[in-house]
Image (cartoon, rainbow, N blue to C red):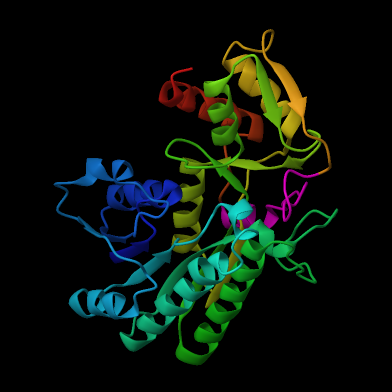
């Protein structure tokens, strides 16, 4: 197929493009390099099945021009502000980068008769809950601008499906880790250790607990759902087979770095790391498991594998 990946130079998008090309598809990437990086896709230069376009998806005229030039079969829409902490400082950030980018993609697809969209959604749409999260639970009460904008985008995708004959796959991610990341708990902690290995500040009290999914498993799951789920409006949780606390993440990281006996851990306190942070959640994976997909790594295994990659990158 001829595929467009928006945000394709980013952490998740670049891994997704690698897999789509491996499967024999032709892939175009649009990225304004706000969070994406050229080093994530430089290895694809010279690949005749890959094309990179540097512009902002908020530029509707440029997006429309690309759709006029290239007949796409499906859009994998990954453009987003994925750094949730930043949205509390700029309340328009997620409105523009998560919601308005989605509207532009949907509208240009409608104008050019492209009917398939795979959307990167999030566990943040569910807000805070002590229940195991299933796809159909409600009410949905997000507590971050990120979650609210993603939920609004899901709603608009539903309307385009029902009004214009689209087919959609909504994939709700947990915390995703692995090489090429630009932020997140491990990235932040490694930055701190790069500056000072004697002491490590950790946001919250360490009891926050969530699932962590390794990025190559995530993109395999995204493509698997796209290839195998066949409703007009498909929505699935993807996640690892366990959760892990922040305290255990820090312990595992320091063990991998051989710093567990020399680095003092200082928790800032409170049951969450920042305003808008959901301190704990657990996904039900029954729906995607029934479809035939399972993650192989548990959260701690994914953490340790990521630390070994980042260790080389940070020179620790």
Looking at the image, residue 302 lies above or below residue 56 = above
Of residues 220 and 147, which is closer to you in this image? 147
Residue drawn 30% across the image and 75% down it = 63
Q: Position of residue 151 (x, y in %)?
A: 63, 71
Of residues 114 and 39, which is closer to you in this image? 39
240 vs 139, left or right, is: left
Quadrant of the image for the N terminus?
bottom left
Q: Position of residue 96 (x, y in %)?
A: 50, 71
Q: Position of residue 130 (x, y in %)?
A: 85, 53
Magenta-drawn segment: 272-292
Of residues 314 and 147, which is closer to you in this image? 314
Q: Position of residue 17 (x, y in %)?
A: 34, 52
Q: Within the magenta stretch, is there residue 287?
A: yes
Farthest top residue? Answer: 261
Looking at the image, residue 2 lies above or below residue 129 = below
Q: Quadrant of residue 207?
A: top right
Farthest bottom residue? Answer: 163
222 vs 115, left or right, is: right
């Amino acid at each position: 197929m001829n595929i467009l990946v928006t945000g394709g130079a980013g952490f998740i998008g670049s891994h997704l493009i690698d897999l789509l090309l491996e499967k024999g598809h032709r892939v175009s990437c649009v990225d304004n390099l706000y969070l994406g990086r050229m080093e994530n896709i430089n290895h694809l230069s010279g690949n005749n099945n890959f094309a990179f376009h540097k512009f902002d998806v908020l530029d509707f005229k440029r997006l429309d021009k690309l759709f006029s030039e290239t007949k796409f079969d499906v859009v994998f829409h990954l453009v987003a502000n994925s750094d949730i902490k930043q949205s509390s400082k700029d309340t328009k950030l997620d409105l523009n980068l998560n919601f308005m980018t989605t509207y532009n993609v949907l509208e240009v697809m409608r104008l050019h008769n492209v009917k398939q969209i795979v959307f990167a959604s999030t566990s943040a749409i569910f807000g805070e809950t002590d229940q195991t999260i299933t796809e159909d639970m409600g009410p949905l009460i997000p507590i971050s601008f990120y979650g609210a904008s993603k939920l609004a985008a899901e709603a608009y995708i539903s309307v385009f499906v029902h009004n214009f004959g689209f087919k959609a796959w909504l994939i709700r991610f947990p915390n995703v880790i692995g090489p090429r990341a630009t932020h997140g708990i491990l990235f932040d902690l490694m930055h701190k250790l790069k500056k000072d290995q004697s002491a490590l500040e950790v946001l919250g009290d360490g009891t926050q607990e969530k699932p962590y999914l390794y990025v190559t498993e995530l993109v395999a799951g995204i493509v698997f759902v796209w290839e195998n789920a066949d409703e007009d409006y498909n929505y699935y949780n993807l996640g690892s087979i366990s959760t892990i606390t922040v305290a255990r993440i820090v312990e595992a990281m320091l063990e991998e770095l051989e710093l567990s006996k020399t680095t003092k851990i200082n928790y800032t306190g409170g049951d969450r790391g920042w305003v808008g942070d959901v301190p704990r959640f657990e996904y039900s994976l029954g729906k995607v498991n029934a479809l035939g997909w399972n993650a192989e790594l548990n959260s701690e295994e994914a953490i340790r594998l990521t630390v070994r990659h980042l260790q080389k990158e940070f020179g620790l």
